[in-house]
Amino acid sequence: MTATRREWNELYTFFTLLSQGTLAVGNAEGVADGPTLPIAYVQRVEHDGKRKYYIDGDQIRIVGEQVNEKFPREDFETVAGMILQTLKASSEAEVEAPQGVEEFLDALKIFNLEAQTEDRTDLHIAFYTEQAPAEGFRIQSMLCGLTPLLDGGRTANLKFEQTGVRFSGPAVNKINYTENPDDVVEIARRMLYIESLGGILKYSDVADKIFRSNLLMLDTNLPRILACMVRSLHLDNISKVAQLTEVLEEKNPLKLKDELVRKHGFYRHKVKQFLLALALGLRPAKMYTGKESAVTGFIMVDGAGRLMVYRKADRDTFADYLFTHTRLEKGSPEKDKYGYLERENRLYYLKLNLKVGFVKR
């Protein structure tokens, strides 16, 4: 039996939660030094519907539509340790099951290694008591690669209008020419070349109307703020969100009063709002109404397999963690259709792509 690293990681996280019975709260620096939350049960979607895995002393009691059984809690710890060792020992995308794990999954009647949900949650956890509402979490793990907060795509492109100089068709072809269409370094070269010829690239709009509306729901100035950050990503080669926010404070693209920028932390606040919205449900191609999604937080797994949790119940810590542990990434220009001068309604535009991922540690 083989499975992807992501599938094994989800099982590892799930079994570790059941074996530990607690989940440590992480701080803004990414260290699990907060309070430890006792887990009453973990809810997961299996092939036969929702199941609840109750932590009952030294037993795990499983209750679902077609199952009501108990298993020794130490078995979950043993299997989680075997999966962790296997993931650490291999760098392959597909990993073979450790001996005995397949039999354990069969005994549990777990056939989907990744939970099949439509609300983007990986599992739900009830803390303290069985009567507590179960909170939905996404798993982010360094054992299998962290998934982006915002996965770019052509719907996440920002448009910059080219003004200042009117380029001829051959000049545009020369600017756009490249031997490797997927080379992100070429984008900065084009931008600098345009400006060296007297051209100006000025933020114009969000390419996709749904994503534009989603950003405007957070703040009418947010697209302009993000455009300044993406521009610095390519021209200044700065990727960390915290450092890009410092660039925002220096350039002050909205021409705000210094007191608002420095004392009130306007740009920092807006960037953190944006990151929280991404973590809790905002996507480029799906209409965002501001309503809370099923995702209430992240379970972060570090390279050693240690777990910590960030919840919207502690928005400030969650936002601070995202602010210091995320970066802008350069997606594929060919796949995401950006980085070239393109003619539209007799004007030329250059698109830059917005992709937000986690800092790799």
Image (cartoon, grey):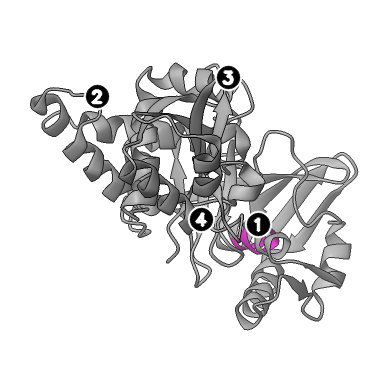
Q: In the picture shown, does residue 272 fall above or below 291? A: below
Q: Hey, which quadrant is residue 154 in on the image?
A: top right
Residue 239, position as x, y percentages in the image = 37, 53
Tag 4 secondary structure: loop
Q: Is residue 80 left or right of residue 307?
A: right
- Say whether disc 3 or disc 1 marks the residue closer to the N-terminus: 1
Pointer 4 residue: 184
Residue drawn at (78%, 57%), measured in percent from left and top? 113
Q: Which residue is mark 3?
A: 209
Specify the amino acid type for callout 4: Val
Q: Which residue does the numbered mark 1 point to in the structure image?
A: 14
User: Is residue 233 visible in the rendered structure shown here?
Assistant: no
Tell me the residue at 11%/23% (across/down). 257
How many residues crowd around disc 1 within 10 Å: few (fewer than 14), some, or many (20 or more)? Answer: some
Instruction: Please tell me which of labels 1 and 2 falls first in the chain.
Output: 1
Instruction: Report the front residue among 49 and 143.
Output: 143
Q: CA distance from mark 1 to mark 2?
A: 45 Å
- Distance from label 3 to label 1 (Cα)? 38 Å
**For numbered disc 3, what is the local secondary structure?**
helix
